[in-house]
Image: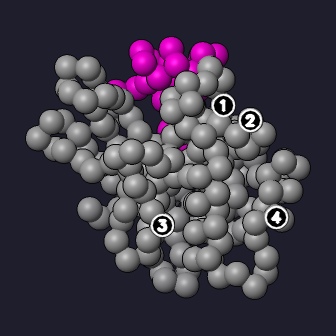
Amino acid sequence: MELICESNNLDDYLLELNEVNFSDHVISKKANELFNHKQTDVEKAKIAFEFVRDEISHSWDIKGNRVTCKASDVLMHREGICYAKSHLLAALLRSQGIPTGFCYQRLMLFDTPEQGYCIHGLNAVFFQSLNKWIRVDARGNKDGIDAQFSIDEEKLAFPINRDLGEMDYPLIYAYPHPKIVAVLEGYTNVLEMYEDHLPESLC
């Protein structure tokens, strides 16, 4: 799939946002722990990706009840759903001057179309050393999910089954999609939100 940038200005993918608040001391402290000036952009991205994937729990997997949205809150509480984890990964990488955007997929919420659909969030990272965008999915691995960092081929959490109504959205957003932010800000119980209130499309 050919990815399409929402903005032709790479600086838009470096902006600090309410959800991507990389100047917060919690984010700054973690960035100082993870990164050093000798690392390449690819090395930094792999480190950040694996940290968010492995060290920040997916709220559904742990049956949490806290809804997180801001990157600093995701890091402080060490949990979030895919949207929230994508905000944290963007914050860590943007803090290092690495352009990072937001991508989305439409997936079956559970196992069959009858159980409904949801929007799944992930990231796209631009590597100046490679002059290309690469999608990565820091949702968190478990049985049946094995997302990896790769600059050669995508190794995302979920394959797309177009025959069952799933799809990739090709746009790389500079800002989290408004529907995503609205749902995270509109609920306080993450399990209720996840089961019944995730957006089914971006339209």
Q: CA distance from mark 4 to mark 3?
A: 20 Å
Q: Are marks 1 and 2 in contact (CB under 8 Å)?
A: yes
| Marker disc for residue 77 | 2
- Residue type indicated by callout 3: Phe
Residue situated furthest left in the rendering = 163
Mark in front: 4 vs 1: 4
Kindly identify which residue carries mark 3: 149
- Say what secondary structure mark 2 lies in: helix
- Residue type indicated by callout 1: Thr
Q: CA distance from mark 2 to mark 4?
A: 18 Å
Mark 1 or mark 2: name the one nearer the start of the chain: 1
Q: Are marks 4 and 3 in contact (CB under 8 Å)?
A: no
Q: Which residues, given as a range, are shown in magenta?
A: 176-200
- Residue type indicated by callout 2: His
- Say what secondary structure mark 3 lies in: loop
Mark 2 or mark 3: name the one nearer the start of the chain: 2
Looking at the image, is 120 positioned above or below residue 156?
above
The verdict on residue 191 being magenta is: yes
Residue 110 in which image quadrant: top left
Left or right of 72? Residue 160 is left
Q: Percent from the top left, x then y, of residue 17?
A: 70, 45
